[in-house]
Image (cartoon, grey):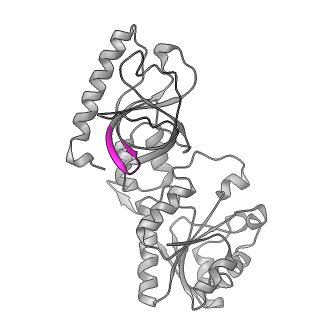
Amino acid sequence: MHIFRSLTDIQPHVAQGSCATIGNFDGVHLGHQALLRRVMDSARNSRLPSVAVTFDPHPLRVILGKTPPFITLTDQKIEIMDKLGLDYLLCLPFTREMAGMEPEQFVLTFLIKGLNLKHLVIGYDYAFGKKRRGDFSLLQELGTKYGFTAEQIGPVQKNGDTISSTRIRELVEQGRVHEARPLLGRWYRVVGSVVEGRNRGGRLLGFPTANLKLIDELAPQPGVYAVWAEFQGQIHKAVANIGYNPTFGNDALSVEVHIMDFNKDIYGSELRVHFVERLRSERKFDSLDALMEQIYQDIASGRELLDRPANAL
């Protein structure tokens, strides 16, 4: 997949036309993936390149200034889309000027002149242009006027749930990470750099931990989780604690990962953490001995969960 960040750069590659979709794709969940695969199928049948158009920063962050935490930041969105097999991703910088464009002007500027659009696929809830006045009905009218076809796909459901970024965000924030997996098509993941912590895990408790400074915005509800820790492409069983360490009286949120059967100095490195299941809530212990006993139980429970074939990464 080739990534472009301006119309000028992508235009030579779509001179004969394109099949495209457009959206924010937060989470690149299974609903988004169905949309992207439909675009790729249409492009293959038409012998045209497939293009996904997205924005950075997110339009709502520009318009409203504040948004809920995102499930996937731009780098992870790009990584997931690349694995799907798209030809091109056009990641446009979103501006207030763009937000104020009338829908027809938006289509003419970015899709007709920019992408030489021949076919457009959108999701059931997509709207665009000033005050979100652009909808599927308008796209059909503009298609007749400018010579492209438009297609809208309906919502994708899983286990009676409509797959949406909002629903996935709710599940993660509630700690129900195992329920988020069927909607995402993967375990929910965060990425962070390993930084110096308070040196309690190894020194006081005998369980060394990697303390993460998160890059991602969305953190699961505080508690202890069975997770897969990914370091330099290698996957390791681990347990993670997200919370405030009430036994020690902390007031700042921390993410600490104990990687099982692992003994490497990884300070300053990137660590990816894939959340499998919440083991318990965070709580205060009366003594270090009680905390240590609980950590032994957490590691044993985490190992047993991660040994299950259904929980493989």
Residue 251, percent from left and from top: 57, 20
Q: In this view of the protein, which residue sits in the foreground, 183 or 15?
A: 15
Residue 250, percent from left and from top: 54, 18
In the depicted structure, whether residue 60 falls above or below residue 93: above
Q: Give the left or right position of residue 124, taking residue 144 as reference.
A: left
Q: Give the left or right position of residue 150, taking residue 278 as reference.
A: right
In the depicted structure, whether residue 83 falls above or below residue 249: below
Question: Which residue corresponds to the image point at 52% horizontal and 21% vertical from the top-left?
Answer: 198
**Dominant secondary structure, magenta:** strand
Q: In this view of the protein, which residue sits in the foreground, 197 or 266?
A: 266
Question: Which residue corresponds to the image point at 53% horizontal and 42% vertical from the top-left?
Answer: 218
**In the image, is residue 73 part of the stretch drawn in magenta?**
no
Q: In this view of the protein, which residue sits in the foreground, 28 or 9?
A: 9
Q: In this view of the protein, which residue sits in the foreground, 292 or 120?
A: 292
Residue 17, percent from left and from top: 57, 88
In the rendered structure, which segment of residues is drawn in magenta? 229-237
